[in-house]
Amino acid sequence: MTAPRRVTVVGAGIVGVCCARFLQRAGFAVSVVDRGEPGRGTSFGNLGMLCSLDHALPLASMAVLAKVPRMLLDYDSPLAIRGRYLPRLLPWFARFAANAPEAARMRNARALATLLEDTLGAYRRLTDGSPAAHYVRREGSLTVYASARRFAQAAGERARLRSLGTRVEELDGNEIRQLEPALHRRYLHATWFPDCGHTPDPYLLTRAIADEVRVAGGEFLEAEVRGFDLGADGVRALRTGGAPIPVERLVVAAGAWSGELARALGSRVPLESERGYHSMLRGVDTGLRRPVTNGDEGLGITQMVDGLRIGGSVEFASLHAPPDYARTRAFHRKARAMLPDLPPESACETSRWMGFRPSLPDHLPVIGASPHHRNLWFAFGHQHLGLSLGARTGELIAALVAGENPRLELRPFRIERFRSWTR
Ligand SMILES: Cc1cc2nc3c(=O)[nH]c(=O)nc-3n(C[C@H](O)[C@H](O)[C@H](O)COP(=O)(O)OP(=O)(O)OC[C@H]3O[C@@H](n4cnc5c(N)ncnc54)[C@H](O)[C@@H]3O)c2cc1C
């Protein structure tokens, strides 16, 4: 009997472990290399939303661009740029702005929708019959508005979502309370996305999938990848702090750190990290059954197994800059305005966290083969949607590595779209 063909995956976040599990299903032996424990990167602390078409609209829009200057002046606003980082960010931001006009935005939205329309289907195929299935729920999500004006202003976005095939319903105050009795009575309008899923703990979901990989014979190696040995036949080995790790086939799924690795492999990409924060109110049980977004202030709350998670904010700063936890200072006040029974901050055991969303300026991930090395594939850049798109990406990567037709138009996700990027 011949040994199964081996694939090495760099990165044990949600994207990497989903790639590994689907690759095993396709008949490959897998090794997953990470400098830390699986699921401890950005996949650890996100808001747990398994978004479907409800999140198909890219962040960059003309309306968002118009708000940027005002948001930058308000420290508690959802957007921040560290002053010293601004010159470095400008080329990325110029591309981001170029993707904001309606035609470009909707073209990107249509491409993203082809991935998002099967978020829960892909997770079902990945987790059915395994303990990980316990961490995948389908209860929909709500975006609530206290301001009738804000709700009316969002009508255009709802129309765009509907044009992409998203199920979007508009709820009044009574309907909101029927779904989520804990929410404040000031909310008289909400957008209800019945097809959105969530996990009550993204770390436990990632770990449960990693455990499946292990049970199926996959190995996890703890090492920091610092470079590559390249040959005419492709990537030969990973250079680490210790002995090189030989590779037959390689998938780079290292989240926000993939840019440097891709560059060493001959592909330059404008990958930025949109840093985001959460506050966790440990032991607090709000009874919320689904993620709720505050449509007035751009903040999200999700009831997790071990407490309430309050999260949001986008901060542009270097991958190496220390966290600025003052960004979370308004989180509790804003969450308490949503949930009147929430205990005061002084009565809560609170932990804070920061993660790095891996973001490309067109809001689309990179999923596909390297143009330079025949045994190399990329799976990164999932920005605000990496948890949602983990399983979908894993399934597509497994098909590509196996040489199968993934039956999806993958051109919008090719790494070559950034050929002119020279930094
Ligand atoms: C506040 C916040 C809220 C969010 N909410 C949601 C949400 O509700 N739904 C959603 O879908 N998404 C959400 N996201 C985005 C989501 O968390 C990310 O897109 C996703 O976690 C990215 O997964 P990943 O596997 O690509 O990266 P990561 O989870 O960061 O994993 C990358 C791994 O690669 C490893 N690595 C990197 N470089 C190397 C190296 N050189 N050598 C070895 N190992 C290396 C790291 O150690 C890490 O384990 C949120 C993000 C934030 C910050």
Image (tube, grey):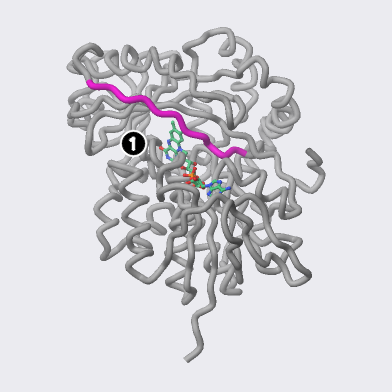
Please tell me which residue is depicted at 19% across the width and 24% down the height of the picture. 182
Q: Residues within 10 Å of mark 1 (few under 14, many from 20)?
A: many
Q: Secondary structure at mark 1?
A: strand
Of the pair 341 and 23, the residue shown nearer to us: 23
Residue found 75% across the figure and 29% down from its top: 91
Kind of residue at disc 1? Ser
Main secondary structure found in the magenta portion: strand
Q: Which residue is mark 1?
A: 141
Q: Position of residue 381 (x, y in %)?
A: 58, 44
Question: Residue 317, percent across and down?
Answer: 60, 25
Q: How many marks?
A: 1
**In this view of the protein, which residue sits in the foreground, 284 or 239?**
239
Task: Tell me which residue sits at (19%, 14%) in the image.
Answer: 347
In percent of the image, x 37 and y 35: which residue is there? 47
Q: From the top left corner, tell me how far across and down residue 93 is, in percent.
A: 70, 28
Most foreground residue, 415 or 24: 24
Q: Does the numbered disc 1 mark a residue whose Cβ is under 8 Å from ligand 1?
A: no
| Residue 110 visible in the shown view | no
| Residue 58 appears in view | yes
Quarter of the image for residue 298 reads top left
136, above or below 201, in the image: below
Residue reaching furthest to the front: 242
Write the start and end of the magenta stretch as one range: 349-359
Q: Position of residue 59 (x, y in %)?
A: 57, 31
